[in-house]
Image: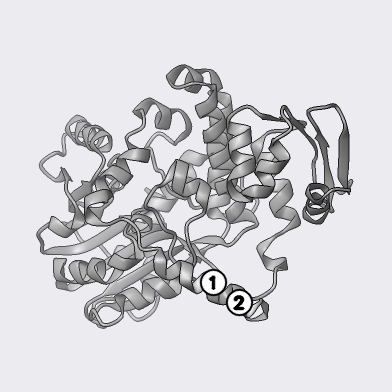
Amino acid sequence: MNMFERILKRLVTQGQLTVIYHDGSSTTVGEPAPGFPALALKFHDRRVPFDIMRDPRLGMAEAYIDGRVSIEGGGPMELVSLIRANNAWEKGRSISARNPFKRGFKKVRQKLWRANHRHRAKANVAHHYDLSAALYALFLDRDRQYSCAYWPDADNEAGIGLEQAQEDKKAHITAKLALKPGMRVLDIGCGWGGMALYLHRTCGVDVTGITLSEEQLKIARARALEAGVADHVRFELIDYRDIEGPFDRIVSVGMFEHVGTAHYRAFFNKCRDLLTPDGVMLIHTIGRIEGPGITDAFTQKYVFPGGYIPALSEMIQGSEGTKLIVTDVEVLRLHYALTIREWYKRTLAHKAEIVALYDERFFRLWTFYLAGAATVFQHGGMVNYQVQYTRDRRTLPITRDYMLDAEAALKGR
């Protein structure tokens, strides 16, 4: 058994994975197990095992994207799920139990990882969010919410659809803002405008949404005009560092991942300056469970250049000393896994349209990206954090009942 097969044997013990080499020989690892698939990887050239060994984080992904590997018995979701389920985050050793040399090396890498400087921010956003609007319309919900929905249970036994789960997400966030009609709200990283329009429609507030994506800006402005609310819901192409306040509330959903660790203090200082003395801010972001790290090579190269998923400790450290008070923290654990699996299903259902927009290679890249994203929330070290901040400790009620009441009222509508 060669080294490649020895590694496979350690990676897969439950479920079966067969590798068919370019010369027709094969090997099988793992054992049949309930809930685990039986898959086969077919290598179309002899360099595939070497490329995977040389760069495990990119080798398999690029071989699949380039058509040098095909998956039989399933697709990227089944393959990545098989690997990650066998190596779930909960099964690993704690950081304190690891090799001290590796811990030291990790800290050095983290210090070097300071992404998304001002002059690169717009280009980094455009790389992902300025893809064809038609692509996002094919796999997102009607409101184009490109962040995790809010589900009632871990397996969605309630059977609600993506549309409802995204509406419930907006209600869940809105309830934490304690809005009153006429308030001024800033939506940092407003996407295609869905959150801003929802806030005005349900709470009667005036919203300014800001983005660095020209494609998102066009659609958001068109939606506000179509709804007849452009005088209350405005969208601007501007960096958060250049916006002027004051605002009664700030909401930011899925944008903090693009700030960059070196700029956290500047971000929170700016937000504090933008808020009124009794202002409230809610940040919804993907987050790391374990602690600070670096962006994986696949995401950095193909999906979100300049992006970085923060640890909760990094967020809190970034806001300490800015005179912002953390008033509520919630961890959404499996919500994004359920959401992205729905996006994956819709992507598969619209393969012909996506291939027509781009090509087969892009479709393989996109499905691999969604598979990796879904499974890292299901089995890996990622969650979502919702962190609420205020400037004054007396601004909000001292129990969470107001959130529950407001959320119930919003859902009742």
Q: Residue at x 45, y 22 (%)?
A: 358
Residue placed most toward the observer, 272 or 58: 58
Residue underneath mark 1: 105
Q: Measured along the vertical axis of the image, is residue 106 above or below residue 228?
A: below
The percent coordinates of residue 276 (x first, y second) are 14, 70
Do we see residue 191 in this rendering? no
The percent coordinates of residue 23 (x first, y second) are 83, 27
The percent coordinates of residue 233 (x first, y second) are 17, 44
Pointers 2 and 1 in contact (C-beta within 8 Å)? yes
Q: Residue at x 59, y 54 (%)?
A: 376
| 404 to the left or right of 215 | right
| 411 to the left or right of 45 | left
- As helix, strand or loop, the secondary structure at mark 2 comes to helix
Identify the amino acid type marked 1: Phe
Residue underneath mark 2: 101
Query: Would you identify the image quadrant in which residue 377 lies?
Result: bottom right
Residue placed most toward the observer, 172 or 33: 33
- As helix, strand or loop, the secondary structure at mark 1 comes to helix
Q: Measured along the vertical axis of the image, is residue 227 above or below residue 2?
A: above
Identify the amino acid type marked 2: Phe
Residue placed most toward the observer, 211 or 178: 211
Q: Residues within 10 Å of mark 1 (few under 14, many from 20)?
A: few
| Number of numbered discs on residues | 2
Do we see residue 210 in this rendering? yes
Q: Residue at x 44, y 50 (%)?
A: 168
Q: Residue at x 72, y 58 (%)?
A: 87
**Residue 63, labelled with which disc?**
none
| 77 to the left or right of 248 | right
The percent coordinates of residue 395 (x first, y second) are 24, 77
Measured in 3D between alpha carbons, the distance from the residue under mark 2 to the one under mark 1, in whole angstroms, is: 6 Å
Q: Residues within 10 Å of mark 2 (few under 14, many from 20)?
A: few
Residue placed most toward the observer, 23 or 97: 23
